């Protein structure tokens, strides 16, 4: 069975690939700064990555984001360096090719974060955009693939996006990136909430304002977010030591290209021209 959803051709018996994206879907991503692509992973792949992710989240070495009033989420940064399953997901050919099709250029892997938004006192994720927290240059194609490893209805804390916000000038004060809905140029723009089935993906531009609700369900929300940067991206410190420290051997200097083994090209030897 074949159907069309949001400009994406969906075969009920086959996962969605880059070839299924219509030109209109690609154009909508570039105009609105996000797109929902259903059915990217097969059920078997979802099970593989959810199992690997749950095992990694069960270890002690993860970051807790929250305060006494509650937990936003727990996450493992650069999870692709700690888990073979997470590396396979970060470089998954369907996810990677979709990212390059939407960006219209060659990309490289920057990092994968494994996220768990628990039940109980879960708090919403505040509205923000990602670019301010990424120590890479302002390359225009940097984007994030958000992969649902469980069903994520509204009640489980799905994502909300502000269409077109990636085209706005950045705030003059970096801290305002975490008060994005308070900015007058953002406050009155429409917002789109996108529930996902396990195996669905959303892709959003690094400057797209987005948020996520609290998890009010009785099961944890488990997802993976993979950041892909332009093939020619360079290291640009944010000034926040915690964000600027990258794992692996070798220190980077400002202006240095991200071209070592930590940041592999998605399509080695191939330059994908803009559509």
Image (cartoon, rainbow, N blue to C red):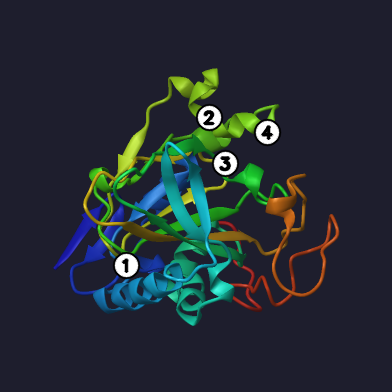
Residue 266: image tag: none
Of badges 1 and 3, the one in the foreground is 3
* Side of 225 relative to 8 (left or right): right
Disc 2 element: helix
Disc 1 element: loop
Q: Earlier in the sequence, mark 2 or mark 1?
A: 1
Q: CA–CA distance between discs 4 and 3?
A: 13 Å
Residue pointed to by mark 3: 207
Tags 1 and 4 touching, CB below 8 Å? no
Residue 16: image tag: 1
Q: Earlier in the sequence, mark 4 or mark 2?
A: 4
Is residue 143 visible in the rendered structure shown here?
Answer: yes
* Side of 204 relative to 132 (left or right): left
Q: CA–CA distance between discs 1 and 4?
A: 37 Å
Residue pointed to by mark 2: 180
Identify the residue at horizontal 24%, vertical 44% (top origin): 155
**Image quadrant where residue 252 sits:** bottom right
């Amino acid at each position: 069975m074949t159907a069309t959803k949001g400009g994406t051709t969906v075969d009920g018996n086959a996962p969605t690939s880059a070839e299924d994206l219509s030109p209109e879907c690609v154009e909508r991503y570039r105009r609105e700064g996000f797109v929902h692509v259903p059915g990217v992973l097969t059920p078997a792949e979802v099970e593989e990555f959810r199992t690997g992710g749950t095992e990694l989240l069960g270890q002690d070495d993860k970051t807790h984001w929250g305060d006494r009033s509650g937990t936003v989420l727990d996450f493992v940064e650069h999870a692709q360096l700690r888990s073979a399953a997470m590396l396979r997901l970060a470089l998954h050919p369907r996810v990677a090719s979709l990212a390059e099709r939407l960006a219209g250029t060659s990309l490289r892997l920057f990092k994968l974060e494994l996220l768990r938004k628990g039940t109980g006192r879960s708090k919403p994720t505040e509205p923000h955009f990602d670019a301010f927290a990424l120590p890479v240059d302002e390359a225009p194609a940097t984007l994030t693939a958000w992969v649902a490893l469980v069903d994520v209805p509204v009640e489980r804390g799905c994502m909300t996006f502000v269409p077109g916000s990636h085209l706005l000038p950045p705030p003059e004060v970096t801290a305002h990136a975490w008060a994005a809905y308070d900015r007058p140029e953002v406050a009155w723009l429409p917002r789109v909430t996108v529930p996902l089935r396990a195996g669905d993906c959303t892709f959003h531009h690094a400057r797209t304002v987005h948020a996520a609700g609290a998890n009010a369900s009785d099961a944890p929300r488990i997802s993976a977010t993979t950041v892909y940067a332009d093939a020619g991206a360079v290291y640009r410190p944010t000034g926040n030591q915690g964000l600027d420290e990258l794992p692996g051997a070798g220190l980077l200097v400002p202006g240095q290209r991200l071209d070592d083994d930590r940041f592999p090209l998605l399509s080695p030897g191939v330059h994908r021209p803009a559509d």
